[in-house]
Amino acid sequence: MVPRKTTLAALLGAAAITGAGAGTASAGSPPITGTEVSRFEESFSDEPFMCQDELYAQTVSGHSLLHFAYFPDTGAMHLHQDDHGKAVAVPLDGTGPTYTANFWFSDTEVIRAVKRGEVLVEQDTDFNHVVGRGSDGSRAFFDFHAHFTVNANGETSVKFSTTRMVCT
């Protein structure tokens, strides 16, 4: 539901390349920061909606906040994205309920170079939460939480994801 993941991937790639050679900047350099606030709208009709098997015409719209901070002295990059908005899903074949939904998406990433830029340490946490209400009184709830940590040895030391969907 959220189109911004490619923006984060591009920023992370740039952080990884830039951060790998960090450590030679002058001491006390201020962080380089940026914030992007935007609106988005997307329509598609090639997927079922939550808890349904049939295809739906879906329109998703909302607001996005992307903030980053790059620390030249250490090569660290902090990224945080929050998206929230609404969706409307109408069954393509005219049967089944029409859904209205609210959603929230969050992605937080912290990356830094260690061992003279030879290893990237990373923490990544994702949340995705959707609540939909059908025109027939049905409800659909989706909750996703994932996290991983790559330690200074380049090993994944923490990794989990939980997904919960409730259809009533």
Image (tube, rainbow, N blue to C red):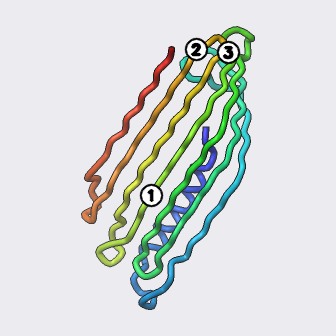
Mark before the other along the chain sequence, 2 or 1 = 1
Q: In the image, is 43 to the left or to the right of 23?
A: right
Residue type at the position of mark 2: Ser
The image shows residue 141 at horizontal and vertical percentages of: 51, 26
As helix, strand or loop, the secondary structure at mark 2 comes to loop
* Numbered marks: total: 3
| Vertical position of residue 49 compared to residue 34: above or below | above
| Label 2 – label 1 distance at C-alpha | 35 Å
Residue name at image x 43 percent, y 78 percent: 21
Left or right of residue 123, residue 49 in this image: right
The type of residue carrying mark 3 is Ser
In this figure, which residue is indicated by the disc labeled 2? 138
Quadrant where the N terminus sits is top right
- Counting from the top left corner in percent of width and height, residue 6 is at 59, 51
Q: Nearer the viewer, mark 1 or mark 3?
A: 3
Residue 81 spot, x, y in % from top left:
55, 54
The residue labelled by disc 1 is 109
The residue wearing badge 3 is 135
Whether the residues at callouts 2 and 3 have beta carbons within 8 Å, the answer is no
Where's residue 18, x and y in %? 49, 74
Q: Quadrant of residue 25?
A: bottom left
Residue type, mark 1 in image: Glu
Q: Secondary structure at mark 3?
A: loop
- The answer to which of 126 and 8 lies nearer the viewer is 126
Label 1: few (<14), some or many (≥20) within 10 Å?
Answer: many
